[in-house]
Amino acid sequence: MTDTTLGFTEIKQWLRHRHPMIYVDRILDHRPGESLRSMLLVSGTMDAIAGHFPERAIFPGSHLIQAFAQSGIILYQMSTSPLEDDELTLIGSVHTRFFRIVVPGDQVIFDVRADRLLGTSFHFSCKATVEGAQVAAFRGSLVRVKVDELGRQLW
């Protein structure tokens, strides 16, 4: 792995997402074409926590999937090339397994592995841990597309 960490400012260069949809706080390590380790600090003030559930704050699994996908998007671009202005990266498929809930105060570490790169698609897997205990496992694919291939914008 590299010894270079990337903070929030550098992460924004790899993602089209913006607040409140950025779920990667830091890239801890990366090896283009092979692996990436990222981190998410779960705070009780996050928009995703506010209504899920008021009596017992739980970080939504769908948002954990989004953090996994964003980590994969960053590894994909580091392994190939940054997105052009007219490109987006979309989730092609996701297979997820959750082992325990994630709550405010947790520091989630995502260990992402590049499994296969085929043209404009990228297949990867990930293990998410909190304090060394596995909280989720993921397998997924991403597809790089031109914005004009998505059809007419509806808004």
Image (cartoon, rainbow, N blue to C red):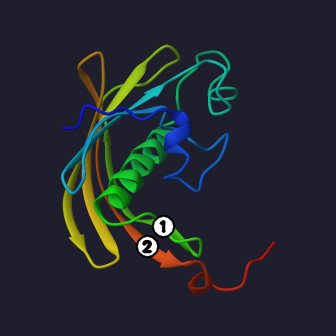
* Residue placed under numbered mark 2 in the picture: 144
Q: How many marks?
A: 2
- Pick whichever, 22 or 28, lies toward us: 28
Identify the residue at horizontal 55%, vertical 46% (top origin).
12
What SS does tag 1 mark? loop
Q: Are marks 1 and 2 in contact (CB under 8 Å)?
A: yes
Identify the residue at horizontal 48%, vertical 53% (top origin).
14
The residue positioned farthest toward the right in the image shown: 155
Q: Is residue 86 visible?
A: yes
Label 1 neighbour load within 10 Å: few <14, some 14-19, many 20+? some
Is tag 1's residue or tag 2's residue first in the polypeptide sequence?
A: 1
- Where residue 106 appears, as percent x and y from the top left, is 44, 17
What SS does tag 2 mark? strand
**Amino acid found under the numbered disc labelled 1:** Leu
- Where residue 58 appears, as percent x and y from the top left, is 53, 24
- Pick whichever, 4 or 57, lies toward us: 4
- Pick whichever, 6 or 67, lies toward us: 6
Identify the residue at horizontal 65%, vertical 47% (top origin).
18
Q: Quadrant of the N terminus?
A: top left
Where 30 falls versus 145 (above or below)?
above
Foreground tag (1 vs 2): 1
Q: CA distance from mark 1 to mark 2?
A: 8 Å
Where 144 falls versus 133 (above or below)?
below
In the figure, is residue 22 to the left or right of 131?
right
- Where residue 79 appears, as percent x and y from the top left, is 28, 60
Identify the residue at horizontal 67%, vertical 40% (top origin).
20
- Where residue 8 appears, as percent x and y from the top left, is 53, 35
Q: Quadrant of the C terminus?
A: bottom right
Label 2 neighbour load within 10 Å: few <14, some 14-19, many 20+? some
* Residue placed under numbered mark 1 in the picture: 83
